[in-house]
Image (spheres, rainbow, N blue to C red):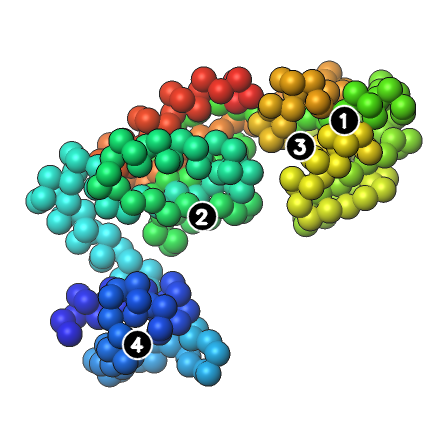
């Protein structure tokens, strides 16, 4: 096995945390993948993985090596793409990260249409509610909600979202509508998420107004919180895009609009700027105008 193939095996095993799964990803047998890693470790004179009957984990040297190898393979792929014309033709695997609900509601439907137009592109979407390092994770594009820190990344603004408090017409008919932030204390609140404090809501244009609420119910699933609010049991606080169809249909209504914080911008972020691969440029050119037309993102 040549050195380049061994490096691809190393990355696949590291990402899968398994020799068997890493081998399948590269089209090899598990013994072949194991021999490749053993040869690589012998050549380097360093242990890249710790092995047990259940887990395969990178050593400290392995983690450092992984970042360097990913860069090498990315540069080599870019050179291959340039030579083969892929710099101008969307081909290869497109890796995207985005928040879970945004991905479910907006990215997935767009992506299937994009793939229909570009049959030589494959896609992998990581839907997680955390900031992912594009370079370290080998990703092409990220959907970022919120103000962007200064960086070398390129960003295309596609809209904005509000942080809203909402409930159903049935709930308001029974419990009334809060007129001031302090009224929230006496209302049923459904809190969602896993990061405390869940009982402190920041309101006001600059977000400096702190309101303590008393959640009667806390759930880890945002979708569950929204569903409970739809059923008329209580109020929940969400981003406007997460309940866009509900607000349009009237199933949910917002309250305390004058106390909402400043809307959060949404960007498509990528690494290479104008030198980005054709698959990246093509997806941004496809997705950005369509996302900008969505009512809940304006």
Tag of residue 30: 4
* Contact between labelled residues 1 and 4, with CB atoms less than 8 Å apart: no
Q: Is residue 32 visible?
A: yes
* Contact between labelled residues 4 and 2, with CB atoms less than 8 Å apart: no
Q: Position of residue 273 (x, y in %)?
A: 28, 34
Q: Earlier in the sequence, mark 3 or mark 4?
A: 4
Rendered residue at 22%/57% (across/down)? 73
In the rendered view, does 226 fall on the left or right side of 211? Answer: left
Rendered residue at 65%/39% (across/down)? 223
Residue highlighted by disc 1: 167
Tag of residue 126: 2
Q: Earlier in the sequence, mark 1 or mark 2?
A: 2
Rendered residue at 78%/38% (across/down)? 190
Numbered disc in front, either 3 or 4: 4
- Which secondary structure, mark 2? strand
Q: Assign the N terminus to one quadrant of the image.
A: bottom left
Q: Position of residue 38 (x, y in %)?
A: 27, 81
Q: Earlier in the sequence, mark 4 or mark 1?
A: 4
* Contact between labelled residues 2 and 1, with CB atoms less than 8 Å apart: no
Q: Earlier in the sequence, mark 3 or mark 2?
A: 2
- Which secondary structure, mark 3? strand
Tag of residue 28: none
* Contact between labelled residues 4 and 3, with CB atoms less than 8 Å apart: no
- Which secondary structure, mark 1? strand
Nearer the observer, 148 or 287: 287
Number of other residues with Cα within 10 Å of mark 4, as a class: few under 14, some 14 to 19, many 20 or more: some
Rendered residue at 46%/76% (across/down)? 55
């Amino acid at each position: 096995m040549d050195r380049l193939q061994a490096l691809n095996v190393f990355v696949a095993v590291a990402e899968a945390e398994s020799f068997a799964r890493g081998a399948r990803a590269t089209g090899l047998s598990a013994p072949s993948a194991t021999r490749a890693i053993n040869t690589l470790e012998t050549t380097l004179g360093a242990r890249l993985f710790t092995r047990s009957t259940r887990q395969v984990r990178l050593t400290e040297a392995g983690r450092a090596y992984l970042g360097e190898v990913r860069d090498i393979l990315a540069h080599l792929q870019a050179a291959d793409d340039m030579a083969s014309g892929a710099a101008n033709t969307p081909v290869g695997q497109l890796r995207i990260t985005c928040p879970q609900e945004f991905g479910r509601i907006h990215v997935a439907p767009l992506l299937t249409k994009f793939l229909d137009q570009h049959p030589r592109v494959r896609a992998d979407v990581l839907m997680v509610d955390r900031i992912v390092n594009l370079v370290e994770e080998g990703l092409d594009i990220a959907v970022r909600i919120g103000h962007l820190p200064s960086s070398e990344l390129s960003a295309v603004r596609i809209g904005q979202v509000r942080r809203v408090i909402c409930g159903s017409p049935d709930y308001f008919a029974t419990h009334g509508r809060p007129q001031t932030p302090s009224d929230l204390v006496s209302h049923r609140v459904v809190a969602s998420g896993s990061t405390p404090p869940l009982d402190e809501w920041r309101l006001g244009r600059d977000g400096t107004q702190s309101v303590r609420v008393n959640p009667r119910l806390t759930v880890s699933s945002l979708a569950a919180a929204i569903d409970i609010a739809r059923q008329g049991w209580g109020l929940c606080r969400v981003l406007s895009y997460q309940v866009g169809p509900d607000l349009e249909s009237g199933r949910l209504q917002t309250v305390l609009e004058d106390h909402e914080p400043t809307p959060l911008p949404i960007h498509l972020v990528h690494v290479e700027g104008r030198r980005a691969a054709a698959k990246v440029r093509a997806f941004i050119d496809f997705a950005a105008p369509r996302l900008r037309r969505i009512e809940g993102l304006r």
